[in-house]
Image: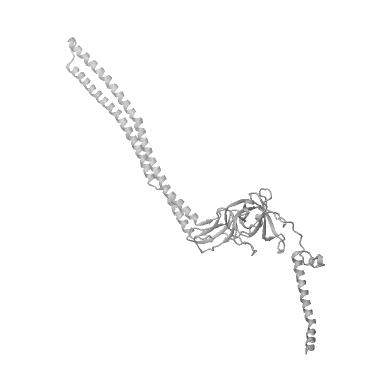
Amino acid sequence: MSTTATSSGWGQRPLVWLLAGLGLGFTIGSIVTVWLGAFGTAEPLGLGKLRTYNRPNREVRPTPLPGVVALGRLEPAGGVIAVSAPGPDIIKEVLISEGQTVEKGEPLAILESHTERQLERDHAKGEYQEALRRRERIRAEAEQRIAEARLARDQVASLGPCDIEAQQIKVSLLEYQLQEARKDLNRLAELRATRDITVPQQQYDQQRLLVEQTEKELEAARSALHKLKRALGYNLRTADAQVRSAELARDRALEEIPVAALKRAWELAEKRLERAVVRAPQAGTILRLFVRPGEAVGTAPILQLADTRQMVVIAEVYETDIERVRVGQRAVVVVPALRQVAGDLNADPVELEGTVDRIGAVVARNQLVDLDPTADADKRVVEVRVALGQAGSARVARLIYHQVSVRILVEQPAAPATAARAVPAP
């Protein structure tokens, strides 16, 4: 029994040793393969040809330049402007489309209230123009009355002295006549006193009556002269008062026409009409359009606008690295969406040059997340703006908010901003 058992056990040993040998060989082969893939070339083991065959045919890259590496996002230098329309209102007509380039002040959309506000503007303008015409008519009539009053004053001022002068001549003439009449009366009286010549009583009485009459006329003439002198001053003052009264009446009539208020109403209606047209706040490109004709507008923006002629990168630099960053330092921006060989997804991404032109002063939580799952998802960073050149800005103008990688060459001397260009991958 024992002999039979022993023979049976030894009969199975060759199979066991065969399986053990195959397992050991597989284990050794796996270890060699992992070691070759992770730590170096296969030439010492005679597998050089195999390793050369599996290695991609790409040139060896130089050692990366020292610097501060950070994630960033592409933005226009002036930011993205969310253009809104005054509401509540309704879009009547959209005058632009996405991707269209517009100039500052160019109309973008027309609101439904435009027609009503245009009628209000025309009505206010008509009232203002009618008030102007009425004011000019009243002014002309008032000026005519003022001219008449001034003419009357000039007449008083010119004719009054003439009347006084004529009356003065009359007084002088009466004084002379009175003087001669008195002489004749005295001469008759002397003749009567001598008794040599008989002077009829009638003649003497007539001469005496002539003297008295002339005295009365002289007294009346002097009184009239005095009256004319006083009347001249009164008439001049009255004429001046009439002129001032006509001028005041003109001013009062003109003030009763609310030209200034009507002009402000017209200007206000013009402003309201202008608000019914949405215009571009700056030159740029229409990025997105959120509304269509017939849709209501309120506080939400109706479109996004940006000037993409100057693009920048907002890099999120880790707070412990920010001390090494300076304005004017060069930076290399890796743009994953662009390839050095167009259409070749295996080609290296395009790299653009830029210059640091602004460093933030606020430490905040990062907004960009690395695609590497082992990278820190929650970091404290400072935003650093890197300005791209004209050529680089043109290449990434349609990649707003695209996530890029940035290497700031902190050990390089500060240099002025230059036009961005594609550079060979490091």
Residue 38 sits above or below residue 221 on the image: below
Residue 125 seen: no
Question: What residue is rendered at 35% in x and 33% in y?
Answer: 155
Number of marks present in the image shown? 0
Question: What residue is rendered at 35% in x and 42% in y?
Answer: 249
Residue 160 sits above or below residue 90 on the image: above
Kindly indicate the quadrant of the structure image that contains residue 426.
Answer: bottom right
Instruction: Name the one closer to the observer, 159 or 250.
Output: 250
Residue 406 sits above or below residue 155 on the image: below
Which image quadrant: the N terminus? bottom right
- Answer left or right for 363 relative to 200: right
Kindly indicate the quadrant of the structure image that contains residue 227.
Answer: top left
- Answer left or right for 342 relative to 161: right
- Answer left or right for 266 relative to 97: left
Here the colouring is one colour
At which x and y percent is residue 58?
76, 62
At which x and y percent is residue 284?
59, 55
At which x and y percent is residue 83?
54, 57
Instruction: Name the one closer to the observer, 136 or 162.
Output: 136
Question: What residue is rendered at 67% in x and 58% in y?
Answer: 334
Instruction: Name the one closer to the observer, 224 or 16.
Output: 16
